[in-house]
Amino acid sequence: MTETPEQTFTLTNDQTGESCKLPLVEGTYGPHCIDIRKLYAQTGHFTLDPSFTATGSCKSRLTYIDGDKGILMHRGYDIKDLAAESTFMEVCHLLLYGDLPNRSQLDKFIHDITYHTMVHDQINYFYRGFRRDAHPMAIMCGVVGAMSAFYHDSLDIYDPRQREISAHRLIAKIPTLAAMTLKYSIGQPFMYPRNDLTYPENFLYMCFGVPAEPYNVNPILTKAMDRILILHADHEQNASTSTVRLAGSSQANPFACIASGIASLWGPSHGGANQAVLEMLDQIGHKDNIPQFIEKAKDKEDPFKLMGFGHRVYKNFDPRAEVMRESCHEVLEDLGIDDPKLELAMELERIALEDPYFAERKLFPNVDFYSGIILKAMGFPVSMFTVLFAVSRTVGWISQWKEMMEEPTLKIGRPRQLYTGPAERDYVPIEKRG
Ligand code: CMC
């Protein structure tokens, strides 16, 4: 980030004529930012931006998004190149350490992750406290937060090596915990991780293997799973990542911070959208009903929205959606699935894209529109979809947390507010209250 004294932005108060100069800061790409940190001291005013539509919360070297051009890059690499050429393990290394690994770095990283995939055996009993019909995200919030109670030797957030071990533990154990969540909900025994399998193979094995039978690795499903993991790995300062950073800014431990990210991801406006897409397709039921649902989505009096459409940042297309669309067809073809839901989804996509309401507002299918269909074809229950998102995003969250913890000027995050409640009033004793 560069900051030159010549680059300033002047704010003038129309009423008093007073003005204040604020520094303009410039990143590698993207619009310049007005650094408002001294605004209150200079003017006595705060800024108000409740949904952060015009506010940057941090500097970051991890991910760049240009929503208008449909660009997503991690550490300078285009997501489409990463999805086509890299494995998820390479992308994890890239996010966590800043560069794609060479062969020996990759081998070491895979070794480090692989040998952390087992969870403390006591965690098995922890699951039994949940109802079998608990939402998998509810279980994930609990068990990931509870990791702080098991891994005391990596909780010193001021020790870089302990931070690294926590990061490895989270990336390694989150698939194990997610698979245990699935197994618990369907009443099958937990499958211990297998170190001879790759990260996506092991995850699919722990989800779909059973002790009674050998497990056959399907290369097409493995590749699709790896791509899903890559495409969801990081997405700069979205709601869940900002939640992780805000929690971490108070010096909370990394497991607690990631649990807070999982809670934030759960909502249907964020990671919960892939589940919501499938539920919406069920609700629509048949192609003939699409126009009626399009009208509902356009009706401002109706809370219904087309799930899987629109994005806070991508206002032309979501580059992840293009890759996911391709994977979607590959998986369905391989599995020989002729899913009427996919046909319905494609028709919905076609009709919505032709509708001026969606075109004018630049509402395009996002990554979740397609990921739900793939995950369903692979055999994941709909309620697990957001858990899959959490498995992928854990590396992004922990890399963002690590980057923040390495900042020498780290301070607790503390937004201000515009108070709109009652003005000061006299206390009324209970017997005099109306
Ligand atoms: N269906 C119908 N209308 C929509 C939709 C939609 N899915 N999304 C936005 N709009 C309308 C919205 O009503 C508004 O209309 P108007 O200008 O007439 O008031 C306009 O489009 C702009 O929308 P917005 O609400 O200001 O956009 P936002 O940036 O605040 O919201 C969003 C982004 C993703 C929350 C929203 O588009 C949405 O709820 N989409 C459906 C849920 C979804 O698919 N979420 C997954 C996001 S991708 C995964 C991730 O990165 O987490």
Image (tube, rainbow, N blue to C red):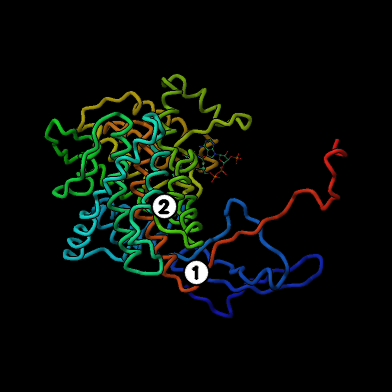
Which residue is the extreme one toward the right? 432
Q: Is mark 2 within 8 Å of ligand 1?
A: no
Image: 297 above or below 19: above
To which residue does mark 2 refer?
258
Q: Position of residue 21 (x, y in %)?
A: 66, 74
- Name the residue located 88 percent from the left edge and 39 percent from the top edge: 432
Q: In the image, 166: left or right of 29? A: left
Q: Secondary structure at mark 1?
A: loop
Residue labelled with disc 1: 410
Q: Is residue 91 above or below residue 302?
A: below
Q: Is residue 188 left or right of residue 433?
A: left
Residue 274 showing in the rendered view: yes
Task: Give the tally of numbered discs.
Answer: 2
Secondary structure at badge 2 equals helix
Q: Residue 15 in the image: x percent, y percent?
A: 81, 65
| Sequence-first disc among 2 and 1 | 2
Q: What's the residue type where badge 1 is placed?
A: Leu
